Amino acid sequence: MQNVIFHLVLTNQCNKRCEYCDLNFSNNYISENNIERFIHYINKNYYKYWEIRINFFWWEPLLKFDSILKILNKIQAVNIKYSIWTNGILLTQDIYEVLNTYNVEINYSIDTETYFSLLDQKYIDVTANNFNINFIVNPNTIDLSEFVFQSIYDRGVKNINILPIYATIHWDHTTLIKLNIFIVNVSKYENISLYGLSYYEKPTSDIEFLLETNWNIYQDIHTHLWFLKQYESVPKNIRDEIEKESYIWTIKDIEKKLIELQFCKLQKLYKMSLDIAKKLWFQINFMLIDKILKKLK
Ligand code: SF4
């Protein structure tokens, strides 16, 4: 039996507009009907998997907290874990308590503009094992990064992932030197992880699916290229390959087909996503940042 991860995109909308964001926005939201279908599928099939992870991610999932609540309340599987990726702005005490009740892993993304939202939310137990901060490091605000990092650390956060922006903003020589110094300094703290290109090099043995707001189902190739603003600049032959390889079915087929996928296909797709990432817009920043991170490991 294998593990399976479902990345659920509940909306293509966000309550922020970060300068480095590489997502396209639209007013698509998941329908209640499809939420019900998904719950039905999990409740009927959970025993076929070793472990199921449901990941509410991309754009801002808390804009559809009603759907999250429905899933948490109605799914009956025992072998299930949940995680959410959020900018944290909508995280009220009530929502935090619901997420905690279901032991949802909270991945709270902050940058130099929004770190204060975390500092204000005193009810959050930042020392809990299921609470992670993704600290986005931006060359335009790199001078503030150590101060913000220290504020988060002093707040008591135990798990901090450092995520330098690589795809949408250019790092020049000066900001790369500053990034290097920043990473050297924060690496001395415990429980700090650094994400660069090497993050994409490790295929997992888990089966991963990405369910879009229209509830087409895709094989997740990790970089989710088709959602990005830069997607239009990808040469057509590569786009055709991505779409051919990654699109699977609509949700109405989930029952009969989901279980059939093989790991060999995943390996091929991971390799493809890495190759594409290296070849296209990521290449310069991605490579430079990854070189810094690898040197420090
Ligand atoms: S919070 Fe995330 S999804 Fe929203 S604009 Fe910023 S980077 Fe994009």
Image: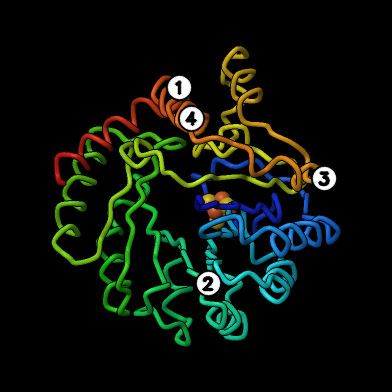
Q: What's the residue type where badge 3 is placed?
A: Lys
Residue 29: give x, y in percent of width and height.
77, 54
Res 92 quadrant in image: bottom right
For disc 3, the neighbor class at 10 Å (few under 14, some 14 to 19, many from 20) is some
Q: Secondary structure at mark 3?
A: helix
Q: Earlier in the sequence, mark 1 or mark 4?
A: 4
Q: Earlier in the sequence, mark 1 or mark 2?
A: 2
Q: Would you name the residue on which mark 1 appears?
A: 280
Q: Position of residue 176 (x, y in %)?
A: 24, 39
At x 46%, y 61%, the residue is: 109
- Amino acid under label 1? Leu
Residue 32, quarter of the rendered image: bottom right
In the image: residue 66, left or right of residue 132: right
Q: CA distance from mark 2 to mark 3?
A: 27 Å
Ligand 1 contact, mark 3 (Cβ < 8 Å): no
User: Looking at the rendering, which quadrant does residue 202 occupy?
Assistant: top left
Task: Tell me which numbered mark, 4 or 3, is placed earlier along the sequence.
Answer: 3
CA gap between label 4 and label 3 equals 25 Å
Task: Say which mark, if any, is on residue 104.
Answer: 2
Query: Is the shortest distance between ligand 1 and the CB of mark 1 under 8 Å?
Result: no
Rounded to the nearest angstrom, the CA distance separating label 1 from label 4 is: 24 Å
